[in-house]
Image (cartoon, rainbow, N blue to C red):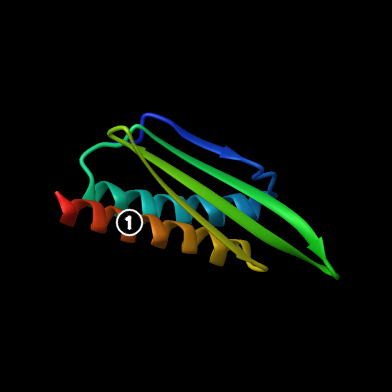
């Protein structure tokens, strides 16, 4: 089952970056869907800030699932590492939530 709503903000990327981000999204959406039957919304926000000669990427993610919001935030110079970190934190929180039931 796919998310009813996937919203990305701040992801103004070139074509090669979009392709890699889509690969990461597909991989982790599959992993989330293996653990959770349904969720209402997944929001991802990317903020870039210039630090020295390179950009620092801050990715924030919110997964809305049955009235509960699972939030995660990761900052890294590598955008893909930050995005992966957010998804890993969300997956850990999903596992924790499922164990508590």
Residue at x-position 68% and y-position 50%: 47
Residue 45, position in %: x, y? 59, 45
Question: What residue do we see at 62% from left, 61% from top?
Answer: 79
| Residue 101 placement (x, y as % from top left) | 14, 49
Q: Quadrant of residue 68?
A: top left
**Callout 1: 10 Å neighbours few (<14), some, many (20+)?**
some
Residue found at the very far top of the displayed protein: 4
Q: Secondary structure at mark 1?
A: helix
Q: Residue 7, how many percent across, how many down?
A: 52, 35
Question: How many numbered markers are drawn?
Answer: 1
Where 72 sits versus 6, above or below? below
Q: Is residue 48 above or below residue 1?
A: below
Q: Residue furthest left?
A: 101
The picture places residue 93, in percent across and down from the top left corner, at 32, 56
Residue drawn at (23%, 45%) of the image: 36
Query: Can you say which quadrant of the picture contains the N terminus?
Result: top left
Question: In the drawing, does residue 35 fall left or right of residue 90?
Answer: left
Find disc 1 in the rendering and name its residue. Answer: 93
25 versus 50 height, above or below: above
């Amino acid at each position: 089952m796919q998310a009813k709503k996937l919203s990305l903000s701040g992801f103004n990327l070139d074509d090669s970056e979009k392709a890699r981000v889509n690969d990461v999204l597909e991989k982790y959406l599959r992993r989330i869907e293996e653990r959770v039957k349904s969720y209402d919304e997944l929001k991802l926000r990317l903020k870039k800030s210039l630090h020295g000669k390179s950009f620092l990427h801050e990715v924030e993610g919110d997964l809305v699932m049955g009235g509960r919001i699972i939030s995660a935030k990761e900052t890294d110079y590598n955008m893909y590492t930050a995005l992966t970190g957010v998804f890993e934190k969300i997956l850990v929180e999903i596992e924790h939530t499922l164990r508590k039931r």
